[in-house]
Amino acid sequence: MFHGRDPIYIQIADRIRTDVAAGTLGEGEQVMSTNQYATTYRINPATAAKAFADLVADGVLVKRRGIGMFVADGARDRLLAARRARFFDEVLAPALDEARRIGIEREELLDLVRTAMARAEVDA
């Protein structure tokens, strides 16, 4: 499960964020405890605890004392809003700049996007 250059706690937090954004983990749903994560993935419990602390700080998880960690109400909507903003800034804005630089006109670009989206809907 853990590979790449990012620290393991970041990979854990990113995986939980992805699961919440995708709806795999629903609002109010309990997540594995830090000890369960440590045992399941053979990592230090402090590593899992750091990931969970970051998720609590970001409002993705809430801790219910004596019960465990749960997906916070509204977490999915907040994550999706942040991802949409990041998508525009990191993907779409640079692509639009490049389209302008190479002379793709607005209508041609819109046609290309409509065609690609229609193709993606058929493939889904």
Image: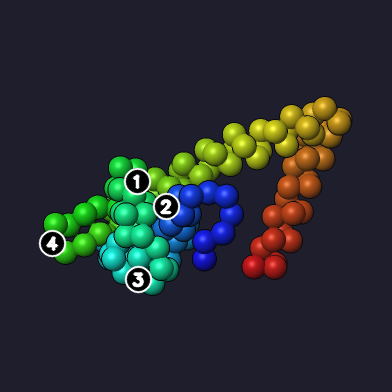
Of badges 4 and 3, the one in the foreground is 3
Q: Amino acid at mark 4?
A: Gly
The answer to which of marks 3 and 2 sits earlier in the sequence is: 2
What numbered label is drawn on residue 66? Answer: 4
Residue 41 x, y percent position in the rendering: 42, 68
Q: Quadrant of residue 91?
A: top right
Measured Cα–Cα span from mark 1 to mark 2: 9 Å
What numbered label is drawn on residue 78? Answer: none
> Within 10 angstroms of label 3, few (less than 14), some, or many (20 or more) residues?
few
> Within 10 angstroms of label 2, few (less than 14), some, or many (20 or more) residues?
many
Which type of secondary structure does the marked residue at label 3 adopt? helix
Of badges 3 and 1, the one in the foreground is 3
Residue 39 x, y percent position in the rendering: 35, 71
Residue 86 x, y percent position in the rendering: 54, 39
Q: Farthest bottom residue?
A: 40
Q: Nearer the viewer, residue 58 or 51?
A: 51
Residue occupying image coordinates x 17% and y 57%: 64
Which residue is tagged 2? 9
Taking the image as drawn, is residue 78 in sight?
Answer: yes
Residue occupying image coordinates x 70% and y 67%: 122
Which residue is tagged 1? 54
Which type of secondary structure does the marked residue at label 1 adopt? helix
